[in-house]
């Protein structure tokens, strides 16, 4: 990240604000912005002063999905070239999932196709009331393949199939109702609400957040019994963290 990048990276009060900065292209995704976004996520993870990461978009929309020039390029590319491009997006999603710090998407305007996937690849999603979500891939004969596992984990099979296969547009209110996003805020003062929410999260125990995120995503591939056993192991680990021990001592001193 440096001059003339497609990402704005700012840190304020322990929160890293990562902004997609191609407003003239509705923050559409291409190889460059995907690579820069991954670099920004890694940089935020390495900074001990940062407790929370906020992902947002500049201009009128959060993200319109793939750049038209990128789509044209992929249509003429070889299988191996397309594999490399698709893998780059997959690596970004995997990086976000593996980060120890919570990543919150702040969505306004439209989050389309890969943009909807990018938002829901975050650990939590806050949306302005006027925001809209849509997996548009089916409308051009394409498949929302890389984001499918994320949508499936956020929703049940039937709801996920409806959204992915029909390309229907749904509002922030509907997205919250079906569990696709966490909360909806009024458009007026949306940025302030996002910062307030980030500040609340940043005050929580960093070790507890890290361990919660780790276990929550690890149990995806486990049986019920394995998940319970993993919970036992992490329970023991959590008890040994300074945050937990200090909080217990503080609580007992008031008893």
Image (cartoon, rainbow, N blue to C red):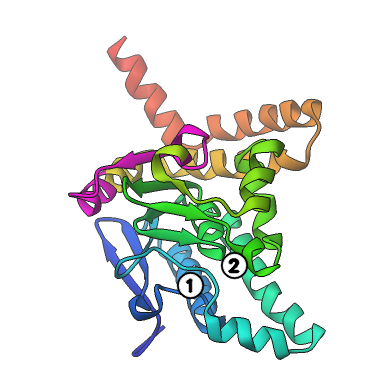
The residue under the point 32% across, 50% down is: 130
Pick the residue in front: 211 or 80.
80
Q: Secondary structure at mark 1?
A: helix
Pinpoint residue 12: horizontal percent, then vertical percent.
25, 61
Q: Is residue 168 left or right of residue 4?
A: right
Outermost residue toward the top in this view? 255
From the viewer's perspective, is 181 left or right of 221? left
Q: Report how far apart the C-alphas of labels 1 and 2 lie in the structure.
A: 8 Å
Q: Residues within 10 Å of mark 1 (few under 14, many from 20)?
A: many
x and y, in percent, of residue 178 in the image: 52, 34
Q: Is residue 57 magenta?
A: no
Whether residue 29 sits left or right of residue 10 in the image: it is right
Residue receiving disc 2:
92
Q: Quadrant of residue 201?
A: top left
Q: Is residue 217 visible?
A: no
Residue at x-position 29% and y-position 42%: 185
Q: Is residue 157 above or below residue 133?
A: above
Q: Secondary structure at mark 2?
A: helix
| Residue identified by numbered label 1 | 37
First to last magenta residue range: 175-196
Left or right: where does residue 212 sit relative to residue 205? right
Tag 2 or tag 1, which sits nearer the N-term?
A: 1
Q: Is residue 91 above or below residue 165?
A: below
Are the residues at dot 1 and dot 2 in contact (C-beta closer than 8 Å)?
yes
| Residue 158 to residue 17: above or below | above
Q: Can you see residue 98? A: yes
- Count of numbered tags: 2
Work out whether residue 133 or residue 181 is closer to the camera in this orientation and state it. Answer: 133
């Amino acid at each position: 990240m440096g001059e003339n990048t497609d990402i704005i990276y700012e840190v304020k009060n322990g929160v890293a604000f990562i902004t997609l900065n191609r407003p003239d292209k509705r923050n559409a995704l291409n190889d460059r912005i995907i690579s820069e976004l991954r670099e920004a996520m890694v940089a935020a993870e390495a900074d001990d002063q940062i407790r929370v990461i906020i992902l947002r978009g500049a201009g009128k929309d959060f993200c319109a999905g793939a750049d038209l020039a990128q789509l044209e390029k992929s249509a003429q590319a070889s299988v191996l070239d397309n594999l490399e491009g698709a893998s780059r997006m997959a690596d970004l999603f995997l990086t976000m999932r593996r980060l120890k710090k919570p990543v919150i998407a702040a969505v306004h305007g439209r989050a389309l196709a890969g943009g909807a996937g990018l938002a829901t690849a975050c650990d939590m999603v806050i949306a302005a009331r006027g925001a809209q979500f849509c997996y548009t891939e089916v409308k051009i004969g394409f498949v929302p393949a890389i984001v499918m596992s994320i949508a499936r984990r956020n929703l049940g099979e039937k709801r996920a199939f409806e959204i992915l296969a029909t390309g229907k547009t749904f509002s922030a209110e509907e997205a919250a109702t079906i569990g696709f996003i966490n909360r909806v805020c009024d458009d007026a003062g949306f940025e302030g609400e996002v910062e307030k929410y980030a500040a609340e999260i940043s005050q929580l125990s960093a070790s507890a957040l890290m361990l919660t995120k780790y276990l929550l995503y690890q149990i995806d591939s486990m049986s019920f019994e394995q998940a319970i056993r993993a919970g036992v192991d992490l329970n023991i680990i959590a008890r040994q963290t300074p945050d937990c021990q200090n909080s217990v001592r503080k609580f007992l001193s008031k008893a």
